[in-house]
Image: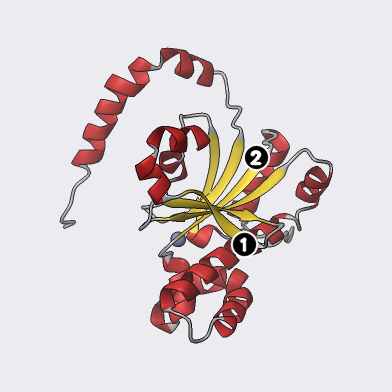
C-alpha cells in the first residue's frame, strides 16, 4: 500500500474550484472557446520546476511539453512515437506560438544520471536512450571542466543540454523557417532551485545571464516581479 494518499490533491482541487475557477469567470469563459497561448515551454518532468508556477502564469498562457531533462530530439520523421516532436508541431503549426522556451533547471536528475553514470546513468529501458540525445555534449563539457567543483560542472552540463534542445529545434524545417522569417523566437532559460534564480541564454555572449536573481528578488520584490 502507498504510504501517502491523494487527499491533498483532491482538497487542492476543491480549493481551486472554489477560489480560482469561480473567481476568474471571465478567463474561463474565454478558455471554453479555445486556447491561444503565447509560448510553448519545454521543461523537465522534475516536480520542482513547474513552468506555470515559476512564471506565475494563468491557464491558457503556456503550452507545455515536459520530458526528462527538457530535451528535444532532432527532427526524425521516421514513423516513431515522437511525443515531444508532436507537441512542438502542434504548438508551432496549429497554435502558432511566437516563442519556444526550453526551461532547464538545477539538480536535474536526468543530467545527473549522465554525469554520475552508474545504474541510473545509462540504465532503464527508456531513460538511457532518451538521455543519449545530449550525451556527446555532456561528455565534452565534463572534459572541458575537469578539476572544477562538481556543482559548476553539473550546472554547465544542465545548461549545455538546453543548448542541445535549441539546436535540435532548429532541425525541424518549419521551426527554422519561422525563426529565420522572424516569426518565432527560441529561448533558453535555466531555473536554479537553490538560489531561486532564473538565467537566460544570451547568444551574443554564449552564456547564461541571470534575469532575476535571488538577491534582487529579496531586495526589490516589485521590480523583480515587473521584470518577470
Ligand atoms: Zn530535470
For discs 2 and 1, the disc positioned in front in the rendered view: 1
Label 1: which secondary element:
strand
Image point (43%, 62%), residue name: 106
Image point (16%, 57%), residue name: 1
User: Which residue bears the numbered disc 2?
Assistant: 91
Image point (19%, 40%), residue name: 7
Per the model, the C-alpha gap separating discs 2 and 1 is 27 Å
In depth, the one of 71 and 155 nearer the eye is 155
In depth, the one of 157 and 61 nearer the eye is 157
View quadrant of ligand 1: bottom left
Q: Are marks 2 and 1 in contact (CB under 8 Å)?
A: no
- Taking the image as drawn, is residue 174 in sight? yes
Compared to residue 8, the image places residue 208 above or below, namely below
Image point (40%, 17%), residue name: 24
Image location of residue 168, percent across then percent down: 70, 60
Image location of residue 68, percent across then percent down: 49, 61
Compared to residue 83, the image places residue 163 above or below, namely below
Amino acid at each position: 500500500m502507498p504510504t501517502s494518499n491523494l487527499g491533498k490533491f483532491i482538497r487542492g482541487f476543491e480549493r481551486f474550484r472554489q477560489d480560482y475557477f469561480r473567481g476568474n469567470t471571465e478567463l474561463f469563459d474565454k478558455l471554453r472557446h479555445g486556447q491561444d497561448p503565447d509560448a510553448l515551454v519545454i521543461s523537465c518532468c522534475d516536480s520542482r520546476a513547474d513552468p506555470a508556477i515559476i512564471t506565475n502564469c494563468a491557464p491558457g498562457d503556456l503550452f507545455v511539453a515536459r520530458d526528462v531533462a527538457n530535451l528535444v530530439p532532432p527532427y526524425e520523421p521516421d514513423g516513431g512515437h515522437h511525443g515531444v516532436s508532436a507537441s512542438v508541431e502542434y504548438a508551432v503549426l496549429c497554435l502558432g506560438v511566437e516563442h519556444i522556451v526550453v526551461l532547464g533547471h538545477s539538480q536535474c536528475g536526468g543530467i545527473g544520471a549522465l554525469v554520475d553514470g552508474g545504474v541510473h546513468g545509462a540504465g532503464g529501458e527508456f531513460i538511457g536512450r532518451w538521455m543519449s540525445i545530449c550525451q556527446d555534449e555532456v561528455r565534452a563539457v565534463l572534459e572541458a571542466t575537469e578539476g572544477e567543483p562538481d556543482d559548476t560542472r553539473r550546472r554547465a552540463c544542465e545548461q549545455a543540454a538546453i543548448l542541445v534542445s535549441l539546436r535540435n529545434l532548429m532541425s525541424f524545417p518549419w521551426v527554422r523557417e519561422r525563426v529565420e522569417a522572424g516569426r518565432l523566437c527560441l529561448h533558453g532559460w535555466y531555473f536554479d532551485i537553490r538560489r531561486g534564480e532564473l538565467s537566460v541564454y544570451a547568444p551574443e555572449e554564449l552564456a547564461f545571464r541571470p534575469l532575476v536573481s535571488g538577491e534582487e528578488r529579496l531586495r526589490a520584490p516589485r521590480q523583480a516581479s515587473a521584470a518577470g
